[in-house]
Amino acid sequence: MRATTARAPHLPPSSFSIGDLLKLHSQRQAMVGAVRWRQVNQFTRIGPKVIMGNLFIAAVNAGVMMPYIPTVELAIWLVTCLVLGGMFAWRHYRLTHDPAYRAARPASFASATLGTVATTFLWWAVPLLWFVHLPPSIQLIVAGLGVVLMSTGAFMLVYVPPASVGYTLLMSVGGLIMAAQLGSLPLAILMILYCIALVMASLVIARELFIQTRSQMELAEMGELVELLRELDAPGSGGLWELDSDFNFTKMSQALTGAVGLSADKVRGRSVFRMIDPDGRYRNMSSGVRQLFTAFREQTAFRDVVVPQVYTDRWWSLSGRPHYDEDGKLIGWKGVASDVTESRTANVDALGAARSDPLTGIANRLLIRELLEQALLGQMNSHGGCALLLVDLDRFKLVNDTLGHAIGDKLLCAIAERLEKVVGGEGHVGRQGGDEFAIIWHGDIDRYSLSGLAERIISEVSRGVTIGAANINVGATIGIAIGPEDGNREDRMMRSADLALYSAKRSGRGGYAFYDHAMLEAAEDHRLLENDVREALKNDDMRLAYQPIVDAATGKMVGREALLRWRHPTRGEIAPDRFIPIIEDAGLIHQIGDWVIREACNEAARWDDQVRVAVNISAAQLTGAGLAKTVVNALALSGLHPHRLELEVTETVFLGDDPDTLASIERLRGLGVRMVLDDFGKGYSSFGYLSRAHFSKIKIDASFVRAAAAGDQQCVAIVNAILALASGLGIETTAEGVETAAQADIMRELGVGSLQGYLFGRPEILGVNVVDMAKHRRDIA
């Protein structure tokens, strides 16, 4: 549906005078009234900026006058300005955000001018009460600020000429008072001339704005009229309809009355809302009904909005637009309606073709959503239940990458055929896009039956597919939502099934999951936390804390690890393993990661030359050459020797066996930076990468440290093996998570080179290192 904003009535060519511009109340001419309506809305949008500018100048004035004027008087004046400005700012906000308030107390030339005059009178306090008591240098500053305020206000208020002229005249009176107090006739004459020039300039600009706005509205109106005429004459239209301003039918063509089974007399005077949704249930389940009713309420044109016919299986496409009288008042609606029931499900025309997937021939995303909405509405009419299954193919990207997209396309067609075979006549199969399919199921919707269906789908998809000489094996992961308990609208059902699919993927691919309300709560919490992360980065709320690393033999500090910390204003301290994945998902890891390296290098440059700084980097940061450039810049700006910077990566960076990862690590090592393998033994543990990536240090995971200190012989053996491997390769070792003296002693006995943990110090913020992202961006620029 393509909706256009309703506009004022057609504006015939007409002339207008300067007097028309300055009239406060509505004009009889349709052109002037319509343009004034448009421009007072523009004034409403810029009003808060004008108020903020006045308050800023008022604060500056108070600042320069403070040494010479009683503080109490200035405070009373500033508070009065703030209160009055706040009142008008609140009105502007409600006019732009509260339709009910806007309808009850609409903005007009009169109200805009009244508000402007009221705030302008406050400026008279400066010349009347204080100007004469100021020294000449301060008088010059105050007068200059008045000229700036006068000129900028005159032009910013030009959308409402009476307000602009009134403001300029009142400010000029204040200037004349200053001239009188100074006894300067030339200054008074200059003020009068300046006032005349400003008024004339603002009126010329206002007149040009009126002409320009009128032309824009006339062109837009002509375009909409042509479009509506084309729409009314469109082939296949089911007929015409008209409504009055109260949304009651005044006319319905014979073709439409026959289709809905009512006579013209019974239709006339009936509310469109009662006709489409008599008991108020359809608007909760049909996106088309909600879209249509919203267009009616907001008086916006609409096109091709598809709604169900009450208590039948028919579907109608409605298009229409509002009509206004010469004063811009709504007088009714006109539009067309077409029966599109067949085209929603059959591929026999252009509309049906637009609802089929061009690759597989099954339903596309649009048709799936329509069929899902239809199924939910069918539930309401006791036509049985429905469930939605989202099927995501596993390892499909590997097929495209290795065998090419042509083979991938053939595989999708084969999978579509298999899904249709499994579903049969008890549902509809569609392709959401990419390698994701959707199934609307009308059979048994108990969890036992749906589990069996999901298992059959996974089994069928997982069977090998032979395409040419290639035998391809993929899998499937499924998310399941049941209507209406998991959603009584198609968008809510889609969201529920998508959350279930996400949960199934996290649990390990090749399975299925049913939607649970806890999934929505977790997703909402994740969304809110992501918003908070963005806000924290914008407000510079994150900091770096540094944890000591000590030599195991001497206890001397040999380094510190830089750790990102975030204290949420309401949640408290947020663990890094919660917010760092969000930073990565949101695509912010390069922005914050670059800053961490720069800040850590700057901080370490102030330490003893023998103390290193360690910074954690993620797999995402290793893509491309950007990280190496960041490191070079950070070292150059801070003066830190490259050997004193350690970059820590975990074993997960090697999961994809990506040669680019090794190339990126090699580029960093070539800079003289020390590469450290963190949490060794906990994850992938490919020993081959220790030599190929040329690591300088291995950090033994804290879980092995605790277990070995507790006497677990298997963990002791693992630690010994790690130490032996490191010794053979000439790699240093650090034991993480050392919290007790006993653990430290065990690690020393085993031969670990350095130790890190709460025993030697918790992470602490050194000096002031608030995340200054604005400065970071300036430095990059």
Image (spheres, helix red, strand yellow):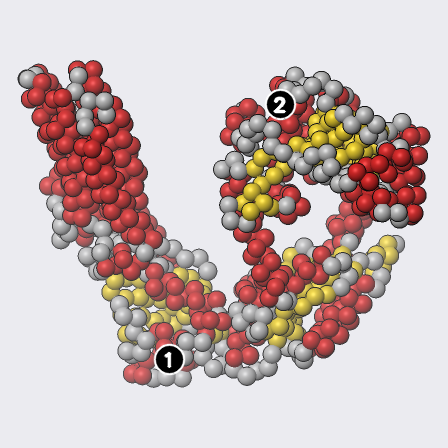
Mark 1 packing: few (<14 Cα in 10 Å), some, or many (20+)? many
Side (left or right) of 71 relative to 601: left
Q: Position of residue 544 (x, y in %)?
A: 61, 33
Q: Residue at 43% of width from left, 67% of height from top?
A: 290
- What amino acid is labelled 1 in the image? Thr
Residue 389 pos. (x, y %): 66, 67
- For residue 404, say whether it is visible: no
Question: Percent position (x, y) of residue 305?
Answer: 45, 65
SS at badge 2: helix
**Distance between the Cα atoms at labels 2 and 1?**
78 Å
Percent x, y of residue 370? 55, 68
> What number is the disc on residue 257?
1
Q: Which of the marked residues, 2 or 1, is nearer the chain's N terminus?
A: 1
The answer to which quarter of the image holds residue 466 is bottom right
The single residue placed furthest to the front in the displayed view is: 741
State the residue position of label 2: 602
**Does 515 appear above or below 183?**
below
- Viewer-nearest of labels 2 and 1? 2
- Residue at image location 21% in from the left, 47% down from the top: 36
The residue depicted at 23 percent of the width and 25 percent of the height is 66
The image quadrant of residue 696 is top right
